[in-house]
C-alpha cells in the first residue's frame, strides 16, 4: 500500500476528520517520512500534534519502509 493511501485511510480511522494529512517528503535511505498536518479541532482543545503517536503507529504498521514519522505544520 502506498504512503499516500495509508495517510488517506488514517483520517477516518484515527477520527481526525478535522485535520488534513499530506505527504511532504519520504527519504527511503533513512525511512524518514515527513507528514504535513494542518487543521484544528473545532469542538475541542486538541491540536494535530496530539495525534502524532497514533499516526506514526498506523503508518509504520502498514508501510514497513517507514521507520520514522515527523509531523510538520
Image (cartoon, helix red, strand yellow):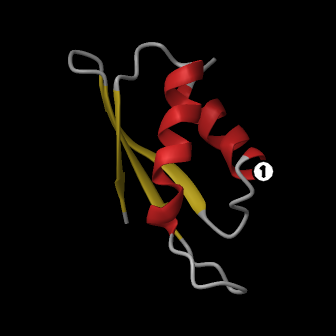
User: Is residue 40 shown above or below 61?
Assistant: below
Please tell me whether residue 1 is drawn above or below residue 46 in the rendered image: above
Q: Looking at the image, which residue is at 21% across and 20% down?
A: 30
**Residue 54 found in image quarter:** top right
Q: Relative to 16, is 3 on the left or the right?
A: left
Residue 39, given in percent of the width and then of the height, sits at 56, 74
Residue 21 as seen in the image, left or right of residue 68 = right
Q: Which residue appears at 59% of the width and 20% of the height? A: 62
Relative to the observer, which residue lies in front, 41 or 22? 41
**Residue 3 vertical position relative to residue 29 in the rendered view, above or below:** below
Q: What percent of the width, then of the height, locates residue 32?
A: 29, 30
Task: Please tell me which residue is depicted at 64% across the width and 79% down the height of the picture.
Answer: 41
Which quadrant would residue 16 be assigned to in this image?
Answer: bottom right
As drawn, 29 above or below 51:
above
| In the image: residue 25, left or right of residue 44 | left
The image quarter containing residue 18 is: bottom right
Left or right: residue 31 versus residue 19 is: left
Residue at left offset 47%, top offset 46%: 53
Farthest residue to the left: give it: 29
Q: Position of residue 40 (x, y in %)?
A: 57, 78
Quadrant occupied by the C terminus: bottom left
Q: State the count of labels.
A: 1
Q: Which residue is mark 1?
A: 12
Q: Secondary structure at mark 1?
A: helix
Where, quadrant-wise, is the N terminus in this rendering?
Answer: top right
Amino acid at each position: 500500500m502506498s504512503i499516500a493511501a495509508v495517510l488517506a485511510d488514517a483520517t477516518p480511522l484515527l477520527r481526525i476528520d478535522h485535520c488534513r494529512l499530506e505527504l511532504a517528503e519520504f527519504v527511503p535511505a533513512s525511512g524518514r517520512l515527513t507528514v504535513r498536518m494542518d487543521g484544528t479541532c473545532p469542538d475541542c482543545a486538541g491540536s494535530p500534534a496530539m495525534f502524532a503517536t497514533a499516526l506514526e503507529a498506523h503508518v509504520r504498521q502498514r508501510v514497513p519502509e517507514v521507520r520514522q514519522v515527523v509531523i510538520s505544520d
